[in-house]
Image (cartoon, rainbow, N blue to C red):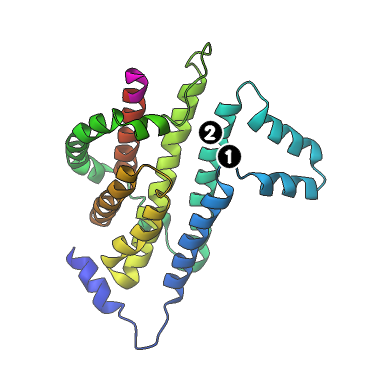
Amino acid sequence: MSGVGDRIRAAAPAPGEVDRNAVVLILLAIGTVIAIRYGGLSSTTDWLTATLDGVALDGLSNRFEEALSASEHAGFNRRMYWGLFRWVVYVVPAVLVARFVLRTRLRDLGLKAGPELRRHAPLYLGLYLVLLPFVVAASFNGEFQDTYPFYEPPPGIGYWPRFYIWEAVYAGQFLALEFFFRGVLVHGLARRFGAMAVFIALIPYVMIHLTKPLAEALGSIVAGTVLGFLSLRTGSVYLGAALHFAVALTIDLLVLGIQ
């Protein structure tokens, strides 16, 4: 972490100086949280149908509404919207900011890969094993059982293929989430704030958990801090995304098994 300390000293702003890149990243985080809260829920899609109607795509708007409400697979369709919306919101604006504002490679924003990742894999596996007893305990909690899994096939409809498709989209959403919070925000802000970037990025990350069970919201503070520092250390969010999804998949399967 000595390199982070060097960046803090090298990037220390003069009194009254505003760092444009840091401001853009903070505004990006604010905008992303607002978009998720007011546009990313399957119950808040009026903006999309109104937009489609406004550009004379009424037929598409009607089919979209039907898919989310009247279709036999409405529950699955709502979850697809949830996951795909988050992927777009986490990735597309962040990539544009990286390209045109930060002017840096995505690889330097948490997307490093290669043999180095294998060296850190045991650490992430160890973290999963440490978390496993807490995940098992949470699966017996009523709040978690009411929340997870986000998608469960209705009675009489098998798990194949929709449940598996959902879990694949769910996994992609975690990769997008880690890229945004532990990649673009942490590494982008570290150029100005060093290791403090982890805690700055933690604020919007915890905010997106405020609709979850209290234990999960509190746990997001620990998870965001640990994964943030690991991202700074490894230069990669890939294993963090894998750990995040492994925990989520485990609780989904445990809750389904208990029910």
Tell me the number on the disc at residue 79. Answer: 2
Query: Taking 242 as reference, is 38 left or right?
Result: right
Q: Residue at x 52, y 50 (%)?
A: 36
| Helix, strand or loop status at disc 1 | loop
Residue 181: % across, % down: 38, 54
Q: Amino acid at mark 2?
A: Arg
Residue 257 lies within the magenta run: yes
Comparing 235 with 55, the one in front is: 55
Residue 220 in view: yes
Q: Quadrant of the N terminus?
A: bottom left
Comparing 126 with 236, the one in front is: 126
Query: Taking 161 as reference, is 123 left or right?
Result: left
Q: Circle 2: is it few (<14), some (14-19), or many (20+) Cα within 10 Å? A: some
Tell me the number on the disc at residue 42. Answer: 1
Query: Taking 84 as reference, is 210 left or right?
Result: left
> Is 117 rendered above or below residue 106?
above
Q: Circle 1: is it few (<14), some (14-19), or many (20+) Cα within 10 Å? A: some
Q: Residue furthest top?
A: 156
| Helix, strand or loop status at disc 2 | helix
Residue 177: % across, % down: 42, 47
> Is 169 rendered above or below residue 106?
above
Please state the extent of the stretch shown in magenta in the rendering: 255-259
Which corner quadrant of the image does residue 172 belong to? top left
Instruction: Tell me how far mark 1 sits from mark 2, CA to CA.
Output: 7 Å
Q: Residue at x 36, y 35 (%)?
A: 143
Q: Residue at x 53, y 33 (%)?
A: 79
Q: Amino acid at mark 1?
A: Ser
Is mark 1 in CB contact (under 8 Å) with mark 2?
yes
Q: Residue at x 32, y 43 (%)?
A: 216
